[in-house]
Image (tube, helix red, strand yellow):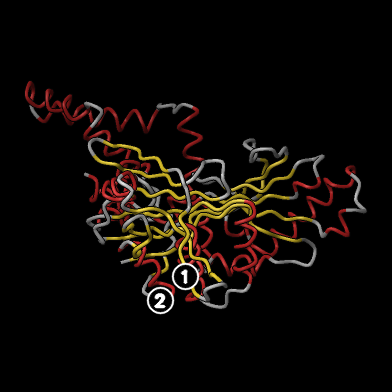
């Protein structure tokens, strides 16, 4: 199965040029707050994320930032007090975007169309597009080796008006492989400083290692490789315009697939020339012509607490300690320690500041997803313990 989606976005709101030219720096703070107010109304972020409050961790280059509600992900709206041209930035991390889209039941293109407003101009400064190969046996080490051996290279389609047909032009892109154990787990294609860069990586391993918010999906599949294109600045601006004209999910999926393969078309090489797309590139191309894809569903599960519980069992030495008690004095000794822990928690245990802060950030989301502890056990702990 091939799933297409958007991982994260950064949106910038600007005053229309004619209005900006009449504005003084002393007026900018009030105007920026007004633009944020308009965005809040259009996007309904107060109802979706929670109450607005100051965010100490501003996006890079910005001085005034706000967060909404208490969550374990990063979502911020910000502006610079004295830099009008920086506009108002809305930064969604991947998990924040999933949370928002899952809560509203809409797609990214619908979000952009929904928050459009006559009071500001909007465009993306970053968007990450993804193609997930799930149980398709895509081998990252093989991709890397074929690139190294120059059996595969990155090409771009272009129309040659002189001969009246399409041809392929090789793009001299740098690539770097990150080795995990004996395998290549990640490939980066393109420069880190460029306006677009592709990352090919083992999403299944990443989710299991980090107990990510798509852990259950990772555990259900045999293999999962993600192609993730990061598009910034001018490329993101172009995608902003295109997304504003999308009418349905098929067009949305086609835009994602065509953008990835037009920028990063992996072609087999024969006698130094482009021969044919690789099988994984062909799968992305096929999405454009026959809609052979599924749009990735948003998912915002938090497995951090389950990870902590699993660590108690498998990594902390607690189980070995209990086993020693059992071997010396039997299960009565184990139960005495467990009951003592329960009494300590109930009566006089004082958590540290990190624990209090974690609870503040996560409590609302956990109880929304799992109002009943039995559901939490069935959905989380049975997969890890």
> Residue 140 location in percent, x, y?
29, 49
> Residue 147 location in percent, x, y?
34, 48
Residue at image position (16%, 26%) is 320
Q: Which mark is residue 253?
A: 1
State the residue in front, 340 or 273.
Answer: 273
**Up/down of 271 relative to 83, above or below:** below
**Up/down of 201 relative to 312, above or below:** below
Residue 241: in sight, yes or no?
yes
**Up/down of 49 relative to 178, above or below:** below
Q: Is residue 238 left or right of residue 85?
A: left
Q: Secondary structure at mark 2?
A: loop
> Residue 191 location in percent, x, y?
51, 42
To which quarter of the image does residue 337 belong? top left
Q: Is residue 127 left or right of residue 18?
A: left
Q: Which mark is residue 185?
A: none
Circle 2 residue: 291
The residue carrying pointer 2 sits among few (fewer than 14), some (14 to 19) or many (20 or more) residues within 10 Å by Cα, namely some
Are the residues at dot 1 and dot 2 in contact (C-beta closer than 8 Å)? Answer: yes
Q: Residue furthest top?
A: 328
Residue at image position (31%, 43%) is 185
> Residue 376 location in percent, x, y?
32, 52
Query: What is the distance, in whole Å, between disc 1 and disc 2 at their CAs?
Result: 8 Å
């Amino acid at each position: 199965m091939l799933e297409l989606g958007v991982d994260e976005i950064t949106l910038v709101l600007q005053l229309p040029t004619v209005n900006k030219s009449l504005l003084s720096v002393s007026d900018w703070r009030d105007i920026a707050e007004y633009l944020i107010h308009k965005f809040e109304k259009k996007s309904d972020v107060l109802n979706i994320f929670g109450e607005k409050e100051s965010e100490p961790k501003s996006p890079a280059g910005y001085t005034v930032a706000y967060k909404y509600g208490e969550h374990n992900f990063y979502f911020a709206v910000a502006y610079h007090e004295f830099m009008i041209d920086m506009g108002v930035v809305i930064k969604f991390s991947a998990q924040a975007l999933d949370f928002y889209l899952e809560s509203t039941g809409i797609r990214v293109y619908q979000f952009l169309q929904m928050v459009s407003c006559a009071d500001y101009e909007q465009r993306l400064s970053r968007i990450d597009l993804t193609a997930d190969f799930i149980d398709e046996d895509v081998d990252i080490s093989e991709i890397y080796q074929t690139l190294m051996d120059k059996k595969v290279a990155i090409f771009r389609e272009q129309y040659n008006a002189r001969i009246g047909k399409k041809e392929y032009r090789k793009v001299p892109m740098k690539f770097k492989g990150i080795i995990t154990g004996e395998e290549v787990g990640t490939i980066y294609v393109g420069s880190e400083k460029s306006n677009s860069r592709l990352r090919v990586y083992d999403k299944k391993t990443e989710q299991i290692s980090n107990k990510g918010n798509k852990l259950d999906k990772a555990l259900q599949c045999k293999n999962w490789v993600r192609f993730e294109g990061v598009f910034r600045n001018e490329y993101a601006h172009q995608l902003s315009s295109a997304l504003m004209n999308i009418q349905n999910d098929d067009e949305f999926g086609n835009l994602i697939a065509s953008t990835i393969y037009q920028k990063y078309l992996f072609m087999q090489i024969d006698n130094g020339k482009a021969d044919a797309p690789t099988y994984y590139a062909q799968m992305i191309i096929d999405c454009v012509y026959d809609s052979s894809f599924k749009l990735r569903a948003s998912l915002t599960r938090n497995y951090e607490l389950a990870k902590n519980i699993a660590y108690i069992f498998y990594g902390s030495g607690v189980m070995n300690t209990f086993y020693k008690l059992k071997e010396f004095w039997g299960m009565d000794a184990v139960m005495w320690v467990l009951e003592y822990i329960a009494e300590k928690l109930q009566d006089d245990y004082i958590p540290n500041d990190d624990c209090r802060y974690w609870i503040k950030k996560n409590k609302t989301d956990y109880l929304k997803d799992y109002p009943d502890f039995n559901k939490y056990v069935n959905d989380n702990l049975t997969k890890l313990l």
